[in-house]
């Protein structure tokens, strides 16, 4: 009996795979477990093995081709077995064009008589890293029911403290280091923020690992700063510096980019005052940090200029409720406003 080999689904967020290498040719006899293809997914390069003994009757893909999950790749059968009814028909000129992950709308059957679309200019192919991030964030928006909270923090004293400490610090401290420290202290106080839904229970994290978004030439990368709960702001600065350098050099290991309960995305250097970040799959929340803005703040009949930042948190409502997240965010704010508590 003929067997159709399809693109396997190897992970919850996998939607497609790329054929790196075909290991057989038509007419080859294979046994169950023999390698038929090498494919690249959003996470790794893996082998596709034969599900049965048989003869390779037809190969339906080419090396370098990207296919959606469950798309046919190869047909196995007995050497003398006819397979014409299993071979997919070649797409005709009137067939519906495929809609890519980046397409904003599907194409209606009534549109093939529509006039051709105008030229769109140069095409920039997606790198594997860009494709992987796009698929993860799409899955997040479709599957994580988020709510969003925003608060402003006065970091006037924090920025002054940074200037003082950096006058003698071996490794320059940054706002990121105090954000890591404030979030770690706050997560220890509100451990529900480390939770993940596990069947009918919420499983808390064993260690306080925090992702820190880093912009690289290939797009955003999120290295994981481990065991933040036990590290001083100086130790966090050393970890952050090393991980950022590895991220920009492209030398992070897969383990450096997985896990964690929360990610910090700091766009303060870009001038963006507020944004709503997307939760990374596998985590419970993400904290978006906006630009530092000099603001007149009324105080005792005066109008002093203070340095304010917006903190916006996106939270998985399956794990954390609004009151818990609000208390956590306010706790982060209070520690940033009293930075001496973080030293």
Image: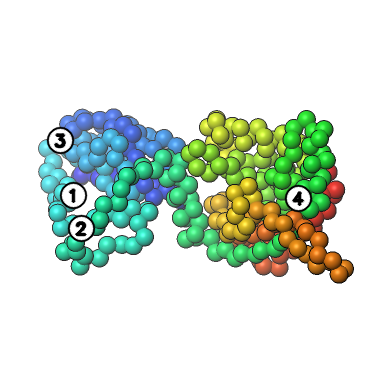
Instruction: State the separation of the CA atoms marked 1 and 3.
Output: 19 Å
Q: Tell me the quarter of the image containing the N terminus.
A: top left
Query: Where is mark 3, residue-wise?
Result: 79
The residue lying toward the viewer, choosing from 245 and 187, is 245
Q: Please tell me whether mark 4 or mark 2 is closer to you in this view.
A: 2
Mark 1 lies on a secondary structure that is: loop
In the displayed structure, 112 sits above or below 121; it is below
Q: Earlier in the sequence, mark 3 or mark 4?
A: 3
At a point 70% along the width and 63% down the height, the residue shown is 151
Q: How many numbered discs sit on the rendered protein?
A: 4
Q: Earlier in the sequence, mark 4 or mark 1?
A: 1
Q: Position of residue 341 (x, y in %)?
A: 85, 49
Q: Which mark is residue 88?
A: 1
Q: Are marks 3 and 4 in contact (CB under 8 Å)?
A: no
Q: Residues within 10 Å of mark 2 (few under 14, many from 20)?
A: few
The x, y position of residue 325, in whole percent, is 69, 63
Residue linked to disc 2: 116
Q: Earlier in the sequence, mark 3 or mark 2?
A: 3
Q: Residues within 10 Å of mark 1 (few under 14, many from 20)?
A: few
* C-alpha separation, residue under disc 1 versus residue under disc 2: 27 Å
Report which residue position mark 4 lands on: 182
Which residue does the image show at 24% across and 57% down from the upper left? 117
Q: Earlier in the sequence, mark 1 or mark 3?
A: 3
Can you give x and y, in whole percent of width and height, for residue 141 in the image?
49, 59
CA separation in Å, label 4 and label 2: 54 Å
Q: Determine whether, in the image, residue 33 is placed left or right of residue 118.
A: right
Task: Please state, as top left, top right, bottom left or bottom right, where the C terminus lies in the image.
Answer: top right
């Amino acid at each position: 009996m003929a067997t159709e080999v399809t693109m396997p689904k190897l992970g919850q967020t996998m939607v497609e795979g790329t054929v790196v290498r075909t290991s057989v040719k038509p007419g080859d006899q294979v046994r169950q477990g023999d390698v038929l293809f090498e494919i690249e997914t959003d996470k790794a390069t893996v082998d596709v093995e034969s599900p049965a003994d048989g003869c390779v009757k037809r190969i339906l893909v080419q090396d370098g081709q990207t296919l959606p999950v469950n798309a046919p790749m190869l047909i196995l059968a007995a050497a003398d077995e006819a397979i014409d009814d299993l071979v997919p028909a070649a797409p005709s000129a009137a067939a519906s064009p495929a809609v890519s992950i980046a397409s904003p709308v599907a194409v209606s059957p009534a549109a093939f008589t529509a006039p051709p679309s105008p030229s769109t200019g140069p095409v920039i192919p997606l790198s594997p890293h860009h494709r992987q991030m796009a698929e993860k964030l799409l899955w997040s928006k479709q599957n994580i029911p988020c709510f969003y909270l925003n608060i402003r923090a006065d970091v006037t004293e924090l920025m002054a403290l940074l200037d003082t400490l950096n006058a003698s610090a071996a490794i320059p401290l940054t706002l990121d280091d105090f954000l890591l420290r404030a979030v770690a202290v706050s997560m220890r106080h509100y451990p529900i923020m480390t939770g993940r839904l596990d069947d009918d229970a919420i499983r808390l994290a064993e260690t306080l690992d925090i992702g820190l978004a880093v912009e690289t030439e290939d797009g955003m990368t999120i290295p994981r700063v481990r065991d933040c709960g036990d590290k001083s702001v100086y130790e966090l600065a050393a970890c952050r510096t090393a991980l950022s350098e590895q991220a920009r050099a492209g030398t992070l290991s897969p383990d450096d980019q997985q896990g964690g309960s929360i990610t910090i995305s700091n766009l303060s250097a870009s001038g963006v005052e507020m944004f709503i970040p997307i939760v990374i799959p596998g985590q419970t929340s993400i904290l978006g940090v906006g630009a530092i803005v000099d603001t007149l703040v009324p105080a005792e009949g005066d109008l002093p200029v203070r340095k304010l930042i917006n903190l916006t948190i996106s939270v998985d409502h399956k794990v954390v409720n609004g009151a818990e997240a609000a208390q956590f965010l306010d706790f982060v704010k209070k520690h940033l406003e009293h930075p001496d508590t973080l030293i």
